[in-house]
Amino acid sequence: MAKTDTKANALDRRGLTDEQLRAIFRNMLLQRQLDNRGFQLNRQGKVPFALGSEGHEALQAGAAMAFERGKDILAPYYRDLGLALGIGLTPYEIMLSIFARAADHNGGRQFPNHYSSKHAGLMSFSSILAAHIPHAVGAAYAMKYRGENGRAVLVTCGDGTTSEGEWHESMNFASIHKLPLVMLVENNEWAISTPLDKQMGQPEIWKRAAGYGMPGKRFNGYDPVETYAVVKEALDRARSGGGPSLVEGTCYRFLAHSTDDNDMTYRTKELVAEARKNDPVPAFEHRLIEAGVMTAADVDALRKDVLRETNEATDKAEAMPYPQASDLYTHLYEGAWQPWQ
Amino acid sequence: MAVSTGSKILNNVEAVRETLYEAMKNDERTVILGEDVGARGNVFLITKDFINEFGEQRVIDTPIAEASIVGIAIGMAMEGLRPIAEIQFADFIYPAFNQIVGEAAKTRYRSNGEYTCPLVIRTPYGGGVRGALSHSVSIEALFYHVPGLKIVAPAFPADIKGLLNAAIDDPDPVLFLEHKKTYRLIKGEVPEGHYTIPIGKADVKKTGNQLTVVSYGLYVHWALDAAQQLEAEGLSVEVIDLRSIRPMDRTTILQSVEKTRKLLIIHEDNKFGGIGAEISAMVAEEALFSLDAPIRRLCAPDVPAMGYAEPLEHEYMSSPAKMAQAMREMVTF
């Protein structure tokens, strides 16, 4: 963890400017506010489902800061709100997804948090875990094949997804072809109700990198600055022809899996409360104030601004129309379609 | 359609090979990936020497991992390449089931058209080659239930070229099925130059007026043999080659059934839940009162696959003689 004994040591900023540090923190606050909003809307009966990434804020905001907009591609999974925000999706776009409105990138077809934006370089994905990882590998192959130096694919997943066969297949193929790919595992210790020790016999996922002949690293996913540095190093290596990496950020899933899950059926309040002592949001706030990057008043103003933006995004998205029933039939194939011709 | 000056005689393997070769020549976005497609040139030698001409970046020998062969091809397609993935034998496609059904078929739909998946998955299928339980299956019924996919299964060299070109040009995922027993057995005239045959159009391979036979793959050839036998007996059978399984050609089937008033569906795949079930249902819905006899399906028995031992394979497979007998019974019903 970062030393906080003196102001000088409070923040090893790893090349990040004050502006970038504040942007990371803003992303973290926005994640928490939007997560909260999704759960509130669900409890109000306004949306059937919501999914949160509380505990992942620092990891995702830090990793997103290493992403180069307009160049890199992100292949995320369904708990990547902060990455989506960090590469350019707006709270309004997030709320359109939560409300399943017609103007959503997916036209209200997919679950919330299943973002897609060709413009932002965010690849469409399904709920089927690890299925997106070979897609990321294929995208990285396309970049390399076309000789597009300076670009890379950032692909993410949770700890549970590393059990899937396609996870292995993808790492193996990326290694063979030295593809511009960074596999970022967000290890929050839980796969719905299944803890890490039931998911794998050897719990340090980054160590598998050696088996694929690629660099691997584990980092503290509660530290957005360290996350940024590790992910940036890996992305820079990928962009410059150095091949793929496997990086693993540790964190914790503070919320239940989703609004449809009751985590008290498989873990205790005490366990979650203990984990929350390491909550990355107040910790980073403290560090920024300690380092003089922000004042307490700045933080207060930022919180208000994030709440305002969330409220505006909520109201604006809620006011938008649902897709029409006839939209069920569009975009199946190019052009009109009948199974019988 | 055809912009050709001449034609030449090719077998089915050569037709696939020539079409793939032209696609590689004509479009640098085209890449071929699969098990043993490179140095070996595919187990049937379809891509022999491609690697020397196009390089290993475009002719990719993959690890033995079917799910990611298709999955990686999907990612390539989403990001601007035009991949042609090969599953070495259709029997090995099961590990890739989710990538085909859950991912490729839904890419355009789930992203509301933002992302597309212009992907061809080629695979040899079918029996009669002593392929046993795991080198002889038919897989089309497992996939034809799935909106978002197109499935073609041509049986003649000229159809293979036209439909493979159409599949390669198609902006959506196409499962391209090649009956492996026809690979070197079936030869025919193939027009030169680039041409396409629309996916979803059947072809009447023999005209007749007493019975409509609908089939595809190897069995079209056997059905034609059987129909010739009946012709000698003075019985007139029309044989339709579906060529495309999804979408399917309702117009051609109904026009024929309205004429002959009898329908026999013949396929190598299992009867229960097979392609014939959908055709039967469609004809029952659309043309029941035109029929002079119950619809009949001549299909594989309800067992997992054909056994390796010769009598087991023989029992599983139909034959021109069995087909001729079924046709006789239908015509004289």
Image (cartoon, rainbow, N blue to C red):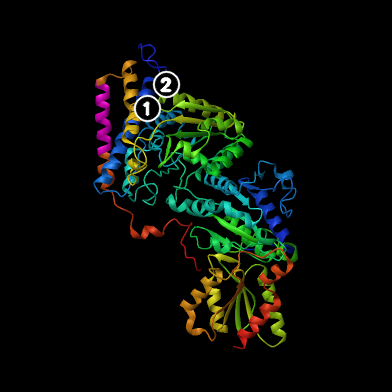
Q: Which residue corresponds to the image point at 69% horizontal and 88% vertical from the top-left?
A: B234
Vertical order, B57 against B236 (above or below): above
Label 1 resides on the chain identified as A
Badge 1 marks a residue whose secondary structure is helix
Q: Which residue corresponds to the image point at 62% horizontal and 31% vertical from the top-left?
A: A213
Q: Which mark is residue A24?
A: 1
* Chain-order first, disc 1 or disc 2: 2
Is the same chain shared between marks 1 and 2? yes
State left or right for residue B201 relative to residue A337.
Answer: right
Task: Please say if the residues under marks 1 and 2 sit with CB atoms less than 8 Å apart.
Answer: yes
Q: Main secondary structure of the magenta part?
A: helix
State left or right for residue B265 relative to residue A251.
Answer: right
Q: Which residue corresponds to the image point at 33% horizontal and 57% vertical from the top-left?
A: A324
Using the rendered view, name the quadrant where residue A10 is placed.
Answer: top left
Q: Callout 2, which amino acid?
A: Leu
Vertical order, A29 against B62 (above or below): above
Using the rendered view, name the quadrant where residue B326 is placed.
Answer: bottom right
Disc 2 designates what residue?
A16
The quadrant in which the N terminus of chain A is found is: top left
Mark 2: few/some/many CA within 10 Å (<14, 14-19, 20+)? some
Q: Which residues are magenta?
A: A297-311
Is A95 magenta? The answer is: no
User: Where does the image place residue B228, in percent across and percent down from the top left?
Assistant: 71, 80
**Is residue B97 in sight in this rendering?**
yes
**Is residue B186 in sight in this rendering?**
no
Is A304 magenta? The answer is: yes
User: Where does the image place residue B301, in percent across and percent down from the top left?
Assistant: 61, 71
